[in-house]
Amino acid sequence: MNTKKADIPVPAGMLTLSMSPLGYRKPWFVKADDFRVTDDRKYMISIKAGRCWICGHTNRKGFSFVTGPASVAANVAIEPPCHPECAEYAVQVCPFILNPEAKRRSKGLTAAEIDDNHSEAGANPGVFFVTTVKKYKIQPTASGLVLTYDEGDIIARRKWVEGQVVHDSASESDTLKS
Ligand SMILES: [Zn+2]
């Protein structure tokens, strides 16, 4: 972890996570020790009980989704909800999000596991949004579950590019922020 990233305060919920050999906190969703593979059991716990996808602790304050622009346009998310502070920490330190040139390593993964990693983040558009909502719905689709929310349930939405928040009127909706 470089100095700049080390200066970013770690959210309280994440302090209980173990460290990987590379100095990253191991997110709760990781199955075994492979950051590329998410745990199906935890996925269901997170979306049904609102447990933070990153730190694994109970979340009642607001549900934040980290997505790319396509999901924002449709008000959907594929990855489960996080605490707002955990989501914003992730967009600042996660190597897949930080480096637009980074490609998800797919060597050694089955097609199903790659699909589980959800292609929008895998394609790495270099632009990420943290959308925080009051509530969301679980919607079954032909390719699995999708999380959806109504425009009126959005508390805040911030655009992040390479670990920096970008303020522009088109991407920000803080009007309901408490
Ligand atoms: Zn959390």
Image: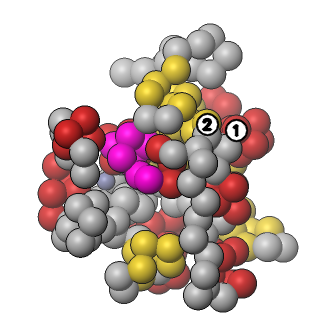
Which residue does the numbered mark 1 point to in the structure image?
A: 69
Q: Is residue 30 above or below residue 89?
A: below
In which quarter of the view is residue 88 placed?
top left
- Report whether 141 appears left or right of 20: right
| Pick the front one: 52 or 32 | 32
Given the image, on which type of amino acid does mark 1 rest? Pro
Taking the image as drawn, is residue 156 in sight?
no
Which numbered marker is on residue 32? none
Q: What residue did someone put label 2 on?
A: 127
Q: In the image, residue 56 lies at what x, y percent? A: 31, 65
Magenta segment includes 93? yes
Q: Which of marks 1 and 2 is nearer the N terminus?
A: 1
- Rendered residue at 25%/45% (across/down): 2
* Closer to the camera in the image, 170 or 19: 19
Q: Nearer the viewer, residue 88 or 126?
A: 126
Q: Which residue appears farthest toward the top when viewing the image?
A: 169
Dominant secondary structure of the residues highlighted in magenta in the image: helix
Is 6 placed left or right of 98 in the picture? left
- At horizontal 41% and vertical 52% (from top left) the residue drawn is 94
> Circle 2 — which element?
strand
Asked if the residue at label 2 sits under 8 Å from ligand 1, the reply is: no
Q: In this view, does 154 lie above or below 82?
A: above
Whether residue 118 is visible here, answered yes or no, is yes
Q: Which of marks 1 and 2 is in front?
A: 2
Task: Identify the residue shown where x is 44% and y is 53%.
Answer: 95
Q: Is residue 20 above or below residue 158?
A: below
Q: Helix, strand, or loop for circle 1? A: helix
The residue sitting at 37% across, 60% down in the picture is: 54
Range of residues picked out in magenta: 89-95
Q: How many marks?
A: 2
Amino acid found under the numbered disc labelled 2? Val
Marks 1 & 2, CB-CB < 8 Å contact: yes
